Image (spheres, grey):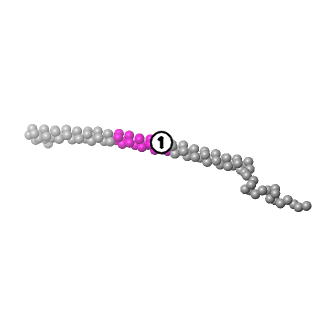
């Protein structure tokens, strides 16, 4: 009596197909890859939104600072203009004491 060969009971791997465990493993890995892709998509979208908001806030602050500097320079020049007009008036009046005091 001949013993059956192993190939009769165990066909080659190419003919066996995937076991239920292997299908579950493949499905689990596919779900994991899909979840990671969704996570990265949400993460990247949040990053882009935050970047746009930061840029908008930066330009807003630039506008506010430039306006504040403009007002400060205008105030400084107004004070200088007032001082120069006061000196000119004192000099034109010929009042040496008032000119020196100014």
Q: Nearer the viewer, residue 63 or 6?
A: 6
Question: Please, what secondary structure does the residue beneath circle 1 have?
Answer: helix
From the viewer's perspective, tell me whether residue 44 is left or right of residue 67: right
Residue lying at the far right in this picture: please name it.
1
State the quadrant of the N terminus: bottom right
Which quarter of the rendering shows the C terminus? top left
Residue 29, given in percent of the width and then of the height, sits at 65, 48
Q: Residue at 51% of width from left, 42% of height from top? A: 46
Image quadrant where residue 63 sits: top left
Q: Is residue 94 visible?
A: yes
- Camera-nearest residue between 32 and 7: 7
Task: Tell me what residue is drawn at x 57 percent, y 44 percent.
Answer: 38
Q: How many marks?
A: 1
Q: Position of residue 11 (x, y in %)?
A: 78, 56
In the image: residue 69, left or right of residue 9? left
Task: Report x, y in % for residue 33.
Answer: 61, 48
Residue extent of the magenta highlight: 47-65
- Residue 56, compared with residue 12, is above or below; it is above
Question: In the current view of this chain or complex, which residue is farthest to the bottom?
Answer: 2
Left or right relative to 100: residue 62: right
Give the residue displayed 8% in from the left and 40% down from the top.
94
Residue 83 occupies quadrant = top left
Q: Is 61 in the magenta?
A: yes
Q: Kindly report the secondary structure that dominates the magenta region of the rendered protein.
A: helix
What residue lies at 21% left-to-right and 41% top-to-bottom?
A: 80
Q: As rendered, which of 67 and 4 lies closer to the eye? A: 4
Q: Is residue 97 visible?
A: no
Quadrant of the rendered image containing residue 91:
top left
Q: Residues within 10 Å of mark 1 (few under 14, many from 20)?
A: few
User: What is the x, y in percent for residue 22?
Assistant: 71, 50
- The residue beneath circle 1 is 49
């Amino acid at each position: 009596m001949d013993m059956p060969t192993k190939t009769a009971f165990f066909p080659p791997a190419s003919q066996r197909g995937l076991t239920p465990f292997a299908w579950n493993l493949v499905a689990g890995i596919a779900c994991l890859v899909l979840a990671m892709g969704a996570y990265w998509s949400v993460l990247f979208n949040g990053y882009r939104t935050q970047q746009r908001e930061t840029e908008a806030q930066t330009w807003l602050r630039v506008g506010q600072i430039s306006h504040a500097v403009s007002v400060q320079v205008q105030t400084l020049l107004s004070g200088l203009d007032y001082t120069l007009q006061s000196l000119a008036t004192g000099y034109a009046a010929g009042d040496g004491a008032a000119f020196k005091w100014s």
